[in-house]
Amino acid sequence: MSTAAIPGAPLPVRTPGSRARGRHRRPERPEIPAGSPALVLAVPATAGPESRSVVDELLSIVRSEQSGVETAAGYLPDASGESPTDAPTVADLLAQAAEAGMPAPVVVPLLPGPHGFLAELNELAAAAGSTVTDVLGPHPLLAEAVHVRLSEAGLARADRARLFAIATSADGVVLTTVGGEEAAAAAGITGVLLAARLAVPVVSAALDVPGSVAAAVEHLRATGSERPALAPLVIGPEADPELLATAAEETGCPSAAPLGAYPTVGQLVASTYLAALERELAAAEAELAAAEAEQAGPAEEQSAE
């Protein structure tokens, strides 16, 4: 697919190119209608070097998935309440779209589950007439990402079909997240998917609830796990790195790395945006059809008279 710049169009329009042939060809990506709203990735963190590295790579993945989508990241303001011009807040981006006369952007939270950031984000978006999508999880693609991070740390086999053993592999996993007990409960669904991939017990716990991770580790040990490990169900920006380090130190368990810019996270961002866009287009079409039907009614009555 190629991108064609059309003068006066608020968003780039993708023109069809040659489609790959063969049984293993990649499914064709849906076309993004001209004038579609931009995607704003809402980052629950300030624009530090680590958060920006992850976010920039994820946006690159999103653009490769859907090159016709205009994308931008909105961060939290820093301690001074200011936001650099190259790291705007979500409020900045929504205001810029309104000032430019563009459609209200679709806001995608960079979160795998429930989080305190969402209440403020929903309030902000509602004031601007923007849609806030669901969070990215639970989802099988997140379970895949956690599995890969565990295998990279030597805590799980990369492929369950390979029957060789890894001496350091975990025989029980605590899926750690942030966002309190609600987030831990939601993570349990991804935990079930992960357990099916690893064939070991998986329990979830909240890093920001004191004693939650330790209790989960003790539960695994009490039920027969001798080598429990921690697997962060966090993308990165939403979690204080000290929480991850403290959990590993207090429990004495090895830990995998956060999901970061794993490719399936970017794919989830893109698909979440597309699902919201599809709903918006369907609602707009239904509203237009209702308006046309309402206008047709009086015209038919006058014709009958």
Image (cartoon, grey):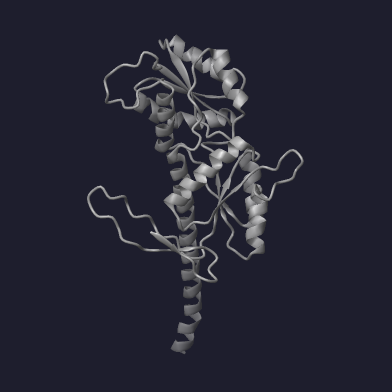
Residue 19 vertical placement versus 226 (above, below)? below
Q: Residue at x 42, y 17 (%)?
A: 172
How many marks the image carries: the answer is 0
The quadrant holding residue 115 is top right
Residue 272 visible in rendering: no
**Left/right of residue 9 with respect to residue 47 in the rendered view:** left
Query: Percent from the top left, x then y, of residue 112?
Result: 51, 37
Q: Is 125 placed left or right of 200 in the picture?
A: right
Identify the residue at image location x=67%, y=52%: 92
Name of the residue lying farthest toward the right: 80
| Percent position of residue 102, x then y | 59, 63
Residue 143, percent across and down? 41, 32
Above/below status of 257 relative to 93: above
Residue 250 can be seen in this image: yes
Residue 237: image location, x then y, percent: 59, 35
Q: Outermost residue, bottom direction?
A: 305
Image point (45%, 9%), residue name: 222
Q: Which quarter of the figure has residue 81?
A: top right
| Left or right, 272 with reference to 21 | right
Picture quarter with the N terminus: bottom left
Task: Give above or below for 283 relative to 242.
Answer: below
Q: Which residue appears at 47% of the width and 61% of the height?
A: 281
Query: Of 142 and 299, which appears nearest the observer?
Result: 142
